[in-house]
Amino acid sequence: MSGLTQREVLLDVRDRSQAMFSGSSSIIPPIHPQSVSIKRAAKLKAGYLSAEQSQGHDDTQSSALMLTSASYTDTIPAPMHETSSTNQIAILESKRQKTSPPGVPGALAVVPTARAATIPRPVWHAPWELSKVIAGHMGWVRSIAIDPDNEYFATGSADSTIKIWDLAKCCAGADNGLRLTLTGHIDQVRAIAISARHPYMFSAGDDKTVKCWDLETNTVIRNYHGHHSAVISLALHPTLDILVTGGRDSVARVWDMRTKAEIHVLGGHQDAVSTIATNSVDPQIVTGSMDSTIKLWDLAAGKTITTLTHHKKSVRSILMSRRELTFVSASSDNIKKWQCREGKFLRNFVGHAAVVNSLAMNDDGVLFSGGDDGTMRFWDYETGYCFQAGKTTPQPGSLEAENGIFASAFDQSGSRLITCEADKSIKIWKENEMATEDSHPIDMQAWAKNRALHTKF
C-alpha cells in the first residue's frame, strides 16, 4: 500500500495530540491528507460512517483541513500554565462543537441570547361607581343604543316596547327623563341601532321582524322580511347604507337599508347568530354564534374569510375597537382579543365565572364586561389588566337572581356607562372623581401573576 503506513498515521496523531494538550507550543502541525483518508476509510469499514456521509465529506475535505488547523491557531491563546491550558482548550472545543454552522466544522458562531419577558405596565384608570338608577320598563331591558349626537339613548325591553330617554336629564336624576315610548313589536326587543348618517333607528325582536323607525315622525317606515325565527342581533355598517341582522335561523342577512333588498344571506353557523359587529375595512362583518364560533366575512363576495374556533362556549357579544384594528369577543369561558384582518388571537381577559352578555368600550381604553350573574369588570384594553371588579345589586322588590346584565354602552363622551339589567332597571355609572393613583394604585404583583398564567408573551 502506497503512502503512509499505519505506524506513521499513529505517530502523526500522537504528535498532534501532544502539541495540542502539552501547552508547550501554540502551533499545531497540519493534518496530512493521506492520514485523513486512512482514518475515514477505517471508520467507514467499522460502520461509523455510511457511504453517503463519506461521499458528502469529499467536497469539504480541503476546506475542513485548512479551517481545523487555522481555527486552533487563531482561537487558542497562549497558555498561562500547564494546568489550565487543557481546560481552556476543552472549553473552546465544547463551544465550537455546539455553535458550528452546518458545513463549516470548527467555526465559531454567535450564540443567541434569550430576551427576558417584560410585563407592560397598564394605563391607570379611575374606578367607576353607580350614579343613577332609572325605572320605567315592565320587563327585562335587553338592548341599548346611544344617539351619535349624545342627546338621547334608546332601550328595548322584554315588554315589547322601545323607550327614548333624555341623556342629560337621566344623568342628572330628573323625573322627566323619559321622552317617549314606541310600540310596534309584539315580542321582546332584542337589538337596537341608531344610524349616524340618517335620522333612522332600527330594531329587531323575537317577533321575527326588523323595523326601521323615522325618528322625526316616530313611526315605522320600513320592515325587513326574511328571517324565519327570532332576530336577536343587529348592526349598521359605519360607511355604507347596509344593515346586518342575525337570528335563530343560524344565518346573518345583509340588507340594503333604503330598498329593503336582501343583498347576502351569510350562512355557515350551526346555531343562532347572537352578535354582529361591522367594520369599514376587511373583515367588514364579524359574527358570533351560539355554536361557539366566530366568522369573519368578506362583504363584497358574501363569503367567509376565516372561522375562529377558540371559544368553547357560545359567543354572546363582539365589540370592534375604535382605537385600532382589533376586536374582542365574550363567552362564558373568557373574553378574547383578536386582530381584525387575519383573526389572529392576541390575548385572554380572564376573570368572569359566568356567561358574559355584554361588552362596551370608550375612547380612553376602558373595556367593560357584564355577566349573567351581575358581575362587572373594568379592563385596560391595551394590556388586559382588570383594574376593577364588582357586582350589581338588584333593586328592591326584585328577586336576588334578577341581577344579570344584558346590554351596556358608553355615551359618546365616554364619561358615562349605561347598563340594562334583569331587574327591569337602567343604571348609569360614572368615574370616581376623587380617585387618584395613590388611592387606587395598580396592583402590579397580582397583574404579573395573572399575566404569567393566562397571557401569551
Image (tube, rainbow, N blue to C red):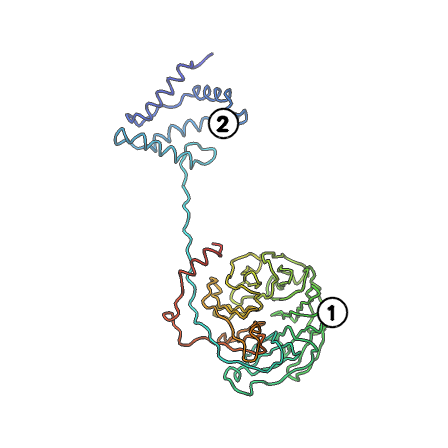
| Mark 1 Cα shell of 10 Å, populated few (<14), some (14-19), many (≥20) | few
In the depicted structure, whether residue 165 falls above or below residue 26: below
Measured in 3D between alpha carbons, the distance from the residue under mark 2 to the one under mark 1, in whole angstroms, is: 73 Å
Q: Which residue is mark 1?
A: 226
Which residue is at a point 68% across and 70% down the rendered structure image? 231
**Could you say which is closer to the camera, residue 251 or residue 278?**
251
Q: Above or below — where is 157 with respect to 331?
A: below
- Residue 66 lies in quadrant: top left
Q: Counting residues from the N terminus, which is met first, the one under dot 2 or under dot 1?
A: 2
> Left or right of 284: which side holds 11?
left
Q: Secondary structure at mark 2?
A: loop
Q: Position of residue 178 (x, y in %)?
A: 58, 85
In terms of secondary structure, where does tag 1 sit? Answer: loop
- For the point 44% across and 22% down, the residue is 36
Q: Nearer the viewer, residue 171 or 100?
A: 171
| The one of 23 and 184 positioned closer to us in this rendering | 184
Quarter of the rendering containing residue 335: bottom right
- The nearer-to-camera label among 2 and 1 is 1
Q: Taking the image as drawn, is residue 295 in sight?
A: no
Q: Position of residue 71 (x, y in %)?
A: 37, 31
Residue 379: image location, x then y, percent = 48, 66
For mark 2, what is the residue? Answer: 57
Give percent across and percent down for residue 113: 40, 45
Asked if 363 appears above or below 87 in the picture, the reply is below
Q: Is residue 369 above or below residue 17?
A: below
Residue type indicated by callout 1:
Gly
Residue 436: which disc? none
Q: Nearer the viewer, residue 375 or 53?
A: 375
